[in-house]
Amino acid sequence: MFVAIFVFTIVFSIALHELGHFVTAKAFGMKAERYFIGFGPTVWSRHVGETEYGLKAIPAGGFVKIAGMTPWEEVDPADDGRLFYQQKPWKRVIVLSAGSATHLVLAFILLIAGLAFVGLPMSTNEVAMVVEDSPGAAAGLEPGDVIVAVDGQAVDGFAPIRDIVEGAAGETLALEVLRDGETITTEAVLDAAHPDPERAGAGFLGVAPEGAVEPLGLVDGTRTAFSPSASVEITGRDYSMWFMTRATVDGLTRIFSLDGLTSFFGSVAGDEPRPAESATSLVGAGQIVNELGNQGDVFAVLVVLAQLNLVLGLLNMLPLPPLDGGHVAVLAVEESVEGVRKLRKDGRSRPKFRLNPSVVTPIALAVIAFFVVLTGTALYLDITQPASQLVQ
């Protein structure tokens, strides 16, 4: 069932992406000639007005054909004034960016759905697991213990415990614990490095609360009242839209860094295991969604789908042809050159500056080749080292 949900979400995301381009182009009076979902042979198509709508055999992409995307394109003279390249720059930027914007909107809706209809684990002080060789383990903490006070300060939920611990790196904390109806006191020496790079330098206890999604470090299992702007924390992380976007950008930066790519491709060429943080194909993403769904973690499924949409939206806006962001970059270069010409006021009459396709095409082909190799490698790893293993 969760595989079907994943496939539906991907197809819906693609359709919504192309709809963003289509609707904004039509709103600005441009001629949208084709709106298709998928690639390969056409399965179905129909003309409605001036637009042909259709489905193709492979639902892994889509496209909208807008008349006059470049000045070199052959067009019907009757469409003069409605061609893409004839529009004001700000209108073209909106049309080019609208597809990626739909992914951000869908990601937000998925997070809202998760918080509104699924919710997060109830606030709890109960320890569900203790990380081996952690300060918590050295202090004698055990699953089932309920931490009721830290350094004499009563605590309600794991959020205040986390705040105290993270601000006490290198210190010794007195923990008051309820175990089997009896209250015991122990001490934890916070001398271990935090495993989360984003929390480097913070104190680390090494316990997970009951109901936490990810049993690593000191993680928060707090349920907050539903709010569209809620800054919800679980597994020690903020699930607000801002945090999710920032975390996705950070993750993509690490994955596409020299070290990240070396480790990724090295796991194919050598005997190294697949990096925990690496690129996955749609097959791998489907594996993760299916595994989380089978574990009954619907909230995590929605988070993964939301983050997948964030990835699609952000990648599409990279300033590299043939991505949407690449078209925006080309437009920016052309308008910048025109701006310099106007500042010079040399009085010469010449055609508007356009980047020659011979300059853009090799870059586009190189980008396509890179993503083909990346996707093929990710698919191979998803088969030989399933991404679902990372969530087991």
Image (cartoon, helix red, strand yellow):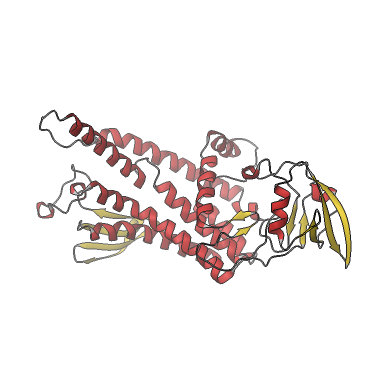
Q: Give the image location of residue 334, x and y in percent.
A: 25, 37
Q: Is residue 1 visible?
A: no
On screen, residue 288 above or below 378? below
Q: Looking at this rendering, what residue extends furthest in the bottom direction? A: 117
Residue 132 as seen in the image, left or right of residue 330: right
Q: Quadrant of the N terminus?
A: bottom right
Q: Residue at x 61, y 60 (%)?
A: 291
Residue 249 visible at all: yes
Residue 361, percent from left and from top: 30, 37
Q: Nearer the viewer, residue 321 or 118?
A: 118
Report the front residue among 302 and 266: 302
368 relative to 140, above or below: above
Q: Position of residue 273 (x, y in %)?
A: 65, 42
Count of picture labels: 0
Q: Quadrant of residue 368?
A: top left
| Horizontal and vertical percent position of residue 195 | 69, 44
Please determine whether, in this image, residue 291 is positioned above or below residue 255: below
In the figure, residue 153 lies in which quadrant?
bottom right
Task: Name the side, left or right, on which 223 lies relative to 343.
Answer: right
Residue 77 is left or right of residue 334, and the answer is: left
Q: Where does the C terminus fall, quadrant-wise?
A: bottom right
